[in-house]
Image (cartoon, rainbow, N blue to C red):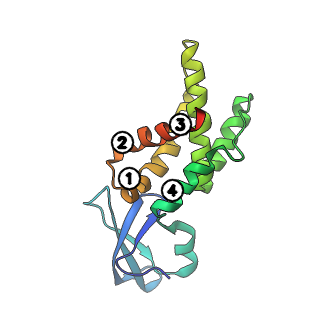
Amino acid sequence: MFQIGETVLYELWGVCTIECMETQKSTEGVQEYLVLRPVYHDTAKLYLPNKQACLEKVLRYVLDRDQIRELLQDLTKEPLQWVEDPKERSRQFRQILSEGDRGQLLRLIRLLYLRRKELREKGRNLRMTDDQALRDAEKLLNGEFAYVLGIPLQEVPNYIHAYMDALEE
């Protein structure tokens, strides 16, 4: 069970600290809520029903430095393959984004980063839907990586891309 003071990843808001528990009236009667404070949205306060089944679906523990390094080192293992059909590719990307698996998100970022690099050499750009998938995947990881690695949020994409470039050499 999640504890007060822990830092967690909330699927909709990113990195949050569990601030306290509060009891409030709701349409279902009196309920206990976890109160979350998003790290990168300090004026927001989020209330989640303190029900184990509900919390396990939307909250995850934040990775540590070693786990992030491991994910980055495993980037070349089982890489995603480029799917030529735009509709099928979009479906695959949406599935990866919705599942939130950090390893798969990094593989998606790598695939799109390399594709963008290849296209730019030809004077072209990613399709809009592919570019959006890249931004969405980065958004899902950036807050957690910035928090754990102690780097500014805006520097995370460069950190990941530098790691990817080193893997390509």
Front residue (pair 3, 106)? 106
Do tag 2 and tag 1 residues touch (Cβ < 8 Å)?
yes
Residue 142 is situated, as x and y percent measured from the top left of the image, at: 43, 49
Quadrant assignment for the C terminus:
top right
72 in relation to 51, above or below = above
- Nearer the observer: mark 3 or 4; the answer is 3
Check residue 166 in the rendering and tell me which mark sits there, or answer none.
Answer: 3
Q: Is residue 38 left or right of residue 88?
A: left
Real-space Cα separation, disc 1 to disc 4, in angstroms: 11 Å
Q: Secondary structure at mark 3?
A: helix
First of labels 3, 4 by sequence position: 4
First of labels 4, 2 by sequence position: 4
Residue 50 is situated, as x and y percent measured from the top left of the image, at: 46, 80
Check residue 146 in the rendering and tell me which mark sits there, or answer none.
Answer: 1
- Nearer the observer: mark 1 or 4; the answer is 4
First of labels 2, 1 by sequence position: 1
Q: Is residue 39 left or right of residue 32?
A: left
Check residue 155 in the rendering and tell me which mark sits there, or answer none.
Answer: 2
Real-space Cα separation, disc 4 to disc 2, in angstroms: 15 Å
